[in-house]
């Protein structure tokens, strides 16, 4: 049995929105929710068109996967897809300009695999159920060492733009001539999520406002056929 707590608010005083004082009386009641509660037909009728529209959009086929895309460590085809197509979306949209970016996202943020066969909008929502946006961050170049250390401790995260083969790091070609590390990530990680504390030391963060999920949907639609990629970008 579930309990629904209903909040009743009685506002006394017409000047509440004009920043004048007002008396507010708050009363809460508990309502038992079980099989004896029947659906409200008028509410169901109101919701039904939206439910049909949402269902139709989620079932819309946007591409085809030639094989299963699974998350794995230190590297998985699912993480590589998210990284590579995010980079492709930003590059084609003119966000990256002439800078060489690396990318890092989180293994735990990949919530569902993409199975071989038709890919629907709903599949991308299952993969990315959160409203994370894409962020472009600028860090001191020496923070690459902190990123590599984090990756070793975690066992691996989705990355792009550089490779780690044991003690060797193969980074962007102009990395040694630059004092700035340009990184593609999400707003969650840019704020230090998943203990990625190196992002808190960034001196500039540009939130594109683009939902990562929407960028991936557009990229799948554009490429049509999605092939799993494992290219050994991390080898311990």
Image (spheres, grey):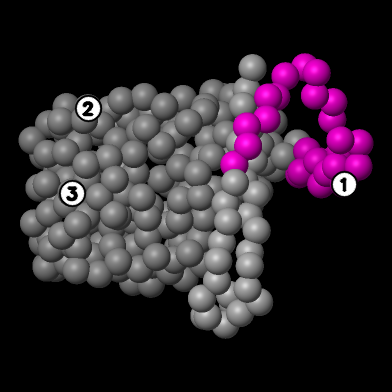
Say few, some or many: other residues with alpha carbon within 10 Å of mark 2 (under 14 / 14 to 19 / 20 or more).
some
Q: Residue beneath label 3, please?
A: 197
Q: Is residue 52 magenta?
A: yes
Say few, some or many: other residues with alpha carbon within 10 Å of mark 1 (under 14 / 14 to 19 / 20 or more).
few
Nearer-N-terminus badge (3/2): 2
Q: Residue beneath label 2, please?
A: 155
- Residue 185 lies, with reference to residue 41, above or below; the image says below
**From the image, which quarter does the N terminus lie in?**
top right
Mark yes or no: residue 53 visible: no
Alpha carbon of mark 3 to alpha carbon of mark 2: how far?
Answer: 17 Å
Q: Quadrant of residue 83?
A: top left
Q: Is residue 234 magenta?
A: no
The residue that appears at 56% across and 29% down in the rendered structure is 114
Q: Residue beneath label 1, please?
A: 46
Left or right of 104 in this view: 48:
right
- Residue 2 lies, with reference to residue 146, above or below; the image says above
Residue 206 on image: x %, y %: 35, 68
The reply to whether discs 2 and 1 touch (Cβ–Cβ < 8 Å) is no
Front-lying residue, 180 or 42? 42
The residue that appears at 72% across and 39% down in the rendered structure is 58
**From the image, which quarter does the C terminus lie in?**
top left
Alpha carbon of mark 1 to alpha carbon of mark 3: how far?
Answer: 46 Å
Magenta stretch in the rendered image: 28-57
Residue 135 on image: x %, y %: 37, 60
Left or right of 116 in this view: 145:
left
Q: Quadrant of residue 233?
A: top left
Residue 202 on image: x %, y %: 19, 63
């Amino acid at each position: 049995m579930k309990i629904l707590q209903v909040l009743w608010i009685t506002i006394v005083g017409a000047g509440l929105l004009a920043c004048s004082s007002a008396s507010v009386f708050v009363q809460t009641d508990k309502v038992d929710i079980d099989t004896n509660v029947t659906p409200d037909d008028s509410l169901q009728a109101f919701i039904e068109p939206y439910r049909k529209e949402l269902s139709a959009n989620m079932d819309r086929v946007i591409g085809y996967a030639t094989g299963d895309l699974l998350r794995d460590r230190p590297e998985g085809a699912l993480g590589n897809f998210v990284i590579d197509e995010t980079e492709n979306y930003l590059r084609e949209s003119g966000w990256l300009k002439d800078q060489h970016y690396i990318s890092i996202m989180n293994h735990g943020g990949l919530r569902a695999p993409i199975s071989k066969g038709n890919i629907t909008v709903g599949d991308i929502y299952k993969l990315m159920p959160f409203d994370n946006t894409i962020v472009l961050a600028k860090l001191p170049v020496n923070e690459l060492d902190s990123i590599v250390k984090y990756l070793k401790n975690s066992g691996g995260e989705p990355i792009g733009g550089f490779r780690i083969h044991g003690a060797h790091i193969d980074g962007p070609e102009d990395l040694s001539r630059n004092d700035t590390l340009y990184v593609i990530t999400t707003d969650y990680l840019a704020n230090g999520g998943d203990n990625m504390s190196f992002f808190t030391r960034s001196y500039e963060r540009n939130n594109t406002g683009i939902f990562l999920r929407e960028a991936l949907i557009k990229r799948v639609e554009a490429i049509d056929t999605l092939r799993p990629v494992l290219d050994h970008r991390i080898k311990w």
